[in-house]
Amino acid sequence: MKGISPIIAIIIILLITIAIAGAAYAYISIIWGRTTEGIQLVSSDCTGAAVSLTVRNIGTKTIATTDVTVTRTSPTGGSPALSADIEPGVMGTINDATCGSGNMCVYKVMAGGQSQEMYAQC
């Protein structure tokens, strides 16, 4: 019984190597893409009916106020917003003046293609 020829063996080894390199490239691209933008809740503070959420930019790019969408999902309404652009590693605030005393306010924050829920109890 004959084995496979050396040329075919080399071609198969090259194809396997190229496939592994492609998979590694795709994995590394996903990891780097996820770390370029991100926001993390540090703390929440409620004074009367006003909520202040302190957030940190955990990515490597500056997050502009126009790049962040904040929606209060419970109770609905209000117009919470990021107060200023946030540099990487720096903290910023999201302010909402109309949460209401005695409410649990739930916020959905979209930044860098990622969504995160944040809570504040007044």
Image (tube, rainbow, N blue to C red):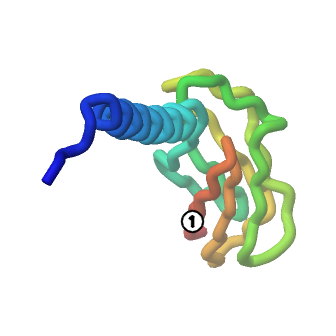
**Quadrant location of residue 88?**
top right
Query: Do we see residue 62 in this rendering?
Result: yes
Q: Look at the numbered disc 1 and give the secondary structure of its residue.
A: strand
**Residue 122 position (above or below residue 110):** below
Query: Do we see residue 58 in this rendering?
Result: no
Residue at 79 percent across and 35 percent down: it is 65
Return the residue nearer the eye: 39 or 14.
Answer: 14
Q: How many marks?
A: 1
Return the residue nearer the eye: 23 or 74.
Answer: 23
* x then y, percent, for residue 73: 74, 72
Q: Locate the N terminus by quadrant.
A: bottom left
Residue at 67 percent across and 63 percent down: it is 107
**Residue 119 position (above or below residue 113):** below
Return the residue nearer the eye: 60 or 71.
Answer: 60
* x then y, percent, for residue 25: 46, 32
Circle 1 residue: 119
* x then y, percent, for residue 109: 68, 55
Residue at 78 percent across and 56 percent down: it is 97
**Residue 8 position (above or below residue 120):** above
Q: Locate the C terminus by quadrant.
A: bottom right
Q: Amino acid at mark 1?
A: Tyr
Determine the residue located farthest toward the front in the rendered image.
Answer: 1
Question: Tag 1: Cα neighbours inside 10 Å, few (<14), some, or many (≥20)?
Answer: some
**Quadrant location of residue 91?**
top right
